[in-house]
Image: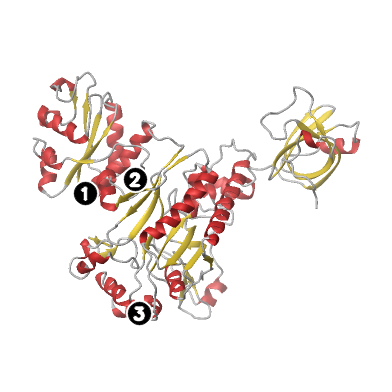
Amino acid sequence: MYKDTNCGEPRESTVGSLITVAGWVHRRRDHGNLIFIDLRDRSGLLQVVFNPEYSEAAHELAGSLRSEWVVQITGKIVRRLPGAENPELPTGTVELSATKIVVLNKSLTPPFEVSDDIDVDDNTRLKYRFIDLRRPKMQAMLKLRHRVTHIMWDFLTENGFTQIETPILLKSTPEGARDYVVPSRVHPGQFYALPQSPQQLKQLLMVSGVERYFQIARSFRDEDLRADRQPEFTQLDFEMSFVHQDDVMAIVEELYLKIFHELLPDATVSDPFIRLSYTESMERFGTDKPDLRFGMELTTITETAATSDARVFQAVASSGGTIRGFVAPGCGNYGRRDTDRLTDFAKSSGAQGLVFIALDESAPSIDALEDDHIKSPLKKFLSIDIVKQLANETGAKPGDLMLIVAGTSRLVNTVLSNLRNEMARRLELVDENDVSLAWIYDFPLFEWDDDLNKWEPAHHVFSSPKAEHMQYLDTDPGKVLADLYDLVCNGQEMGSGSIRIHDKDIQTRVFGVIDYGEDEIQDRFGQLLTAFTYGAPPHGGMGLGLDRLVAILAGEQAIREVIAFPKTQSAVDPLFEAPAIITDQQLEELHIRVVMPEN
């Protein structure tokens, strides 16, 4: 071994010990006769002092050291001089008095300092990711991720689950996003697909009698990226036989409470998890992934708004649209600049505009509102009685601001949900120490696609219709709810699961609703349907995003911060310069010709 002690280990109890350490030169300070360096390894920093009285050769070599050189140092642990201690470091009361140094490797000047206090663009950080990962923050991310997966492994093993790897090269099947495909050299013109999830495989494992399976699974989706998406991601994938929905939820709650209590001991965590039906979540928050750490719930005010003289309200109501809003507390004094910014934000989410009604705080009560207490672009179209009624319906008080959007239900919900989150941010309503975990359940099994003019699965085709809704499967698919559930944390979807279909006839009927032909069904799902005819047990499970969980634990918004080697927002790896062009020889072996787009 090049070292017998880690840099972060020496304490006053080890004073007098002769040790050997190895690591990177973090910082060098030349004080004339004495040279100091901070030596860094994965455990932390240790101050090393080179004194020519103890070793002239070591002192001379120390003078040439530069940032990020890799060195091995031998010496004695001594107390720092009084007043020279560093309370910011665990090793801050001692230092290593060096007697020998060996340079193991030199380094070019790094493109940025190995420090958490850097201002470097993401592209540069990812191009030199091997340097970026040396930073204490990034080392902590890697350790945190390891701890999360360690807890998962131990917990699931103790609860009778078996870890099983599933293939990466598989067949393209619909999972809700584009597949990444891999050409086969030995089967010209044919392709594998990288799995979007191990969905069919884990169901086949249930038919195989495994009963409890899990995997820290790599998954791939060719979709547009954002802060919480990467083309390749990791999820905790698990499946259980002979279970109902509540059984699956119970095992997840126990696991996640264990993770949060161990890794965020000071956080306030929902226990038990909050439960909302999909319908209730959409009605109260306009989204199926609500942030429940603050209020500002949505209210439908279509009937009252439509009785006003505002033509925009009348037109939306008469065309079957909806008018909804929520109250921003204490914002009744917002000026033109503030409301213009809110309107621009609403438009960026797809709204045609934003109606606001500001109530002056000088009004004694809602019942006592008068004309000069109200500020709104639609003021001349809203009678005092209408404003009072809207205030009572939304729960507004003097000094508050009502924010209202009119349009189709989907548009209104999207705009108001985004605006609600934006107002919470502006008003600093979120306690970052809170962890709000919630189950959203009873999702629709299908949703109508206006562009394709057909029913599409709301999540995926393997979710079981609720028994009492089976009667609508062939006649009115829009009424069918599924035993389908999402886990939501602080406004982010953490994972999705369902009780699966385990009956061939029911699965075939579901395929029929979304217009899959017999040949297509057999081609894509034949193996699963065949397995169902050989005694498939009732089963259910989930896929839970590991990257998002670690990001929340670390207080990060972007999941790339907790992935060792992520891609950029444009799905590029600057370190390996991937994706890249392959050689003509490789293309020829694969029997592929590349035709570039004209534009």
Distance of label 2 from label 1 (alpha carbons): 17 Å
> Is 490 on the left-hand or right-hand side of 326?
right
Horizontal and vertical percent for residue 413? 26, 46
Residue 522, which numbered label? 3
Of callouts 2 and 1, which one flags the residue occurring earlier in the amino acid sequence? 2
> Is 494 on the left-hand or right-hand side of 348?
right
Amino acid residing under circle 3: Gln
Horizontal and vertical percent for residue 471? 20, 68
Distance of label 2 from label 3 (alpha carbons): 38 Å
Would you identify the image quadrant in which residue 197 lies? bottom left
* Residue ID for mark 2: 290
Identify the element where label 3 is drawn.
helix
Please report contact status of discs 1 and 3: CB closer than 8 Å, yes or no: no
Amino acid residing under circle 2: Pro
Identify the element where label 1 is drawn.
helix
Seen from the viewer's position, the closer of residues 446 and 270 is 270
Mark 2 or 3, which is nearer the eye? 2
Distance of label 1 from label 3 (alpha carbons): 37 Å
Q: 10 Å neighbourhood of mark 3: few (<14), some, or many (≥20)?
A: some
Seen from the viewer's position, the closer of residues 126 and 494 is 494
